[in-house]
Image (cartoon, grey):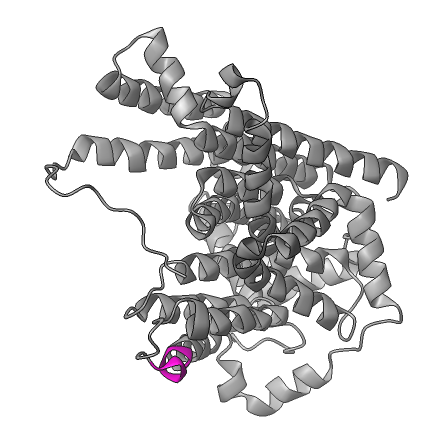
């Protein structure tokens, strides 16, 4: 499988427009920052104002207007042409705004669902995060859960102390309230969710070589209940999901003769394992891709060496995230031994939760599986992504508590797996439209958007009648 992207045609002048680069890279980043400040104004600004959201929209409009003016001129036809040419990007923007609003709603309303953890456990997490700073002891009390997300909570405590101490409200980290820690973490979760949507878009576009596939993956990941419902909770699966998606994105850059992407993919997978032990199963598809689907077709490049680079990156990432497995090996083993087995019929319970809350996504997974079986050319790209969710689903039936939040870890991988068949179905439908619509470049994006809306509608109906 070749991941090379098509380059420019020979003979074309290579001119770098630095203003274009700054606007294309900085302005969307500032727009996202303004959007986040609008959502989190109560904590990061003294006054919360809708002007921050207006600022985000204004920056995006300025960038779009500039790009259109440079390439097409400031005309209605130019605007229409830009919209037609950038359908997948517009779907990504909708996924970000929709996914952000869903996460913000969950953050504010904090609904009681099957994903809601025990309040005592939530308070215990905040207390332990504060104790890490107060006692300067970065060894967790137990390794029943990997510590990377807890370390993130400790960093949040330091941030809160810096903010409140600079205002003269508190004098030591011991005075940081548990609720402040939990409130800040919810916004960290919101940011992680938005980052995951963007990474899934980029990874899906490269893996399936289709902007529509990337947009489909972003929409499915951003609007899935299993992904956004965990936002108000101290859920390490959200951090692990972001790192796991980044690991696969790094893998898409792998090609014969290049081992750096394998190392980075392994490193990110190791960090993800430091947030949720189940992320260690990401190694299964990564090692397969390193050994077979991104290796040299002539067999000159040793598969063992490529797997060694991937494993080496994973070991480094895992050690950085959880140094206690070396520094306190006995305590680490005791923590692993404290992990309880899964309750009876856990697998059936997880399937019922998936069916009740995200019926639309579940239906797409089964339809995409059938499509991949029929279309053997699609199967080679489909099953490596599906392997991790399947393995993880099996492990859930063996260890740990029955908590649907744990499924948030595999949502990006499921979205990436089904994105290709999803986008190809939109193209297939486009080819059967009347001629004037069939030849319109925006038809595929419109059908993809309608397909995402249908998935959301089915999920809403499922929650209405089965949850």
Between residues 37 and 449, which one lies in front from this camera angle?
449
Between residues 387 and 112, which one lies in front from this camera angle?
387
Quadrant of the drawing holding the C terminus? top right
Q: As displayed, is residue 350 above or below residue 196?
A: below
| Farthest-out residue, top | 76
Count of numbered labels shown in the rendering? 0
Q: Quadrant of residue 64?
A: top left
Position of 449 with respect to 15 (left or right) is right
Q: As displayed, is residue 391 above or below residue 185?
A: below
What secondary structure is the magenta-colored segment mainly? helix
Q: As displayed, is residue 416 above or below residue 222?
A: below
Residue 194 place in picture, x, y as percent: 52, 43
Position of 386 with respect to 211 (left or right) is right
**Residue beneath the point at 43% across and 72% down:** 290
Say whether residue 304 is magenta.
yes
Residue 48, visible in the rendered structure: no
Q: Quadrant of residue 315?
A: bottom left
Quadrant of the drawing holding the N terminus? bottom left
The stretch in magenta equals: 302-307
Position of 113 with respect to 19 (left or right) is right
Say whether residue 408 is magenta.
no
Residue 160 place in picture, x, y as percent: 51, 51
Q: As displayed, is residue 165 above or below residue 289?
A: above
Between residues 169 and 42, which one lies in front from this camera angle?
42
Residue 271, visible in the rendered structure: yes
Residue 416 place in picture, x, y as percent: 55, 51
**Residue beneath the point at 36% across and 71% down:** 297
């Amino acid at each position: 499988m070749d991941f090379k992207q098509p380059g420019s045609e020979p003979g074309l002048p290579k001119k770098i427009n630095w203003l274009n680069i700054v606007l294309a890279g900085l302005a969307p980043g500032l727009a996202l920052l303004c959007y986040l400040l609008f959502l989190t104004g109560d904590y990061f600004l003294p006054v919360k104002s809708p002007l921050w959201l207006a600022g985000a929209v204004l920056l995006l409009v300025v960038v779009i207007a500039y790009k259109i003016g440079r390439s097409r001129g400031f005309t209605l036809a130019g605007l229409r042409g830009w919209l037609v040419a950038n359908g997948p990007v517009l779907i990504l923007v909708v996924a970000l705004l929709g996914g952000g609003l869903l996460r913000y709603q969950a953050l504010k309303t904090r609904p009681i669902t099957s994903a809601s953890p025990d309040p005592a456990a939530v308070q215990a997490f905040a207390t332990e995060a504060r104790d890490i700073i107060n006692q300067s002891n970065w060894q967790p009390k137990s390794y029943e859960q990997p510590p990377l997300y807890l370390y993130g909570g400790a960093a949040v405590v330091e941030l809160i102390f810096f903010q409140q101490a600079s205002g003269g409200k508190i004098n030591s980290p011991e005075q940081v309230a548990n609720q402040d820690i939990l409130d800040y973490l919810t916004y960290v979760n919101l940011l992680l969710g938005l980052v995951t949507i963007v990474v899934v878009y980029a990874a899906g576009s490269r893996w399936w070589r289709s902007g529509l596939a990337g947009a489909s993956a972003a929409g499915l990941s951003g609007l899935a209940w299993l992904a956004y419902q965990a936002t108000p909770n101290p859920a390490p699966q959200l951090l692990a999901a972001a790192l796991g998606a980044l690991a696969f994105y790094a893998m898409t850059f792998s090609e014969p003769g290049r081992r750096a992407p394998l190392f980075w993919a392994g490193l990110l997978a190791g960090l993800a394992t430091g947030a949720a032990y189940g992320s260690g199963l990401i190694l299964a598809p990564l090692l397969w891709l390193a050994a077979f689907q991104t290796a040299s077709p002539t067999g000159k490049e040793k598969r063992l060496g490529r797997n060694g680079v991937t494993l080496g990156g994973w070991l480094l990432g895992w050690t950085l995230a959880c140094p206690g497995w070396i520094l306190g090996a006995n305590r680490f083993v005791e923590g692993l031994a404290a992990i309880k087995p899964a309750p009876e019929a856990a697998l059936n319970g997880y399937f019922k939760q998936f069916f009740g809350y995200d019926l639309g996504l579940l239906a797409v997974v089964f339809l995409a599986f059938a499509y991949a079986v029929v279309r053997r050319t699609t199967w080679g790209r489909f099953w490596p992504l599906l392997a991790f969710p399947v393995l993880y689903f099996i492990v859930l039936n063996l260890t740990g508590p029955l908590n649907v939040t744990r499924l948030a870890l595999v949502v990006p991988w499921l979205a990436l797996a089904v994105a290709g068949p999803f986008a190809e179905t939109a193209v297939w439908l486009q080819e059967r439209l009347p001629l004037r619509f069939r030849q319109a470049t925006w038809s595929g994006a419109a059908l993809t958007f309608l397909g995402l809306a249908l998935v959301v509608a089915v999920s809403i109906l499922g929650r209405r009648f089965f949850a």
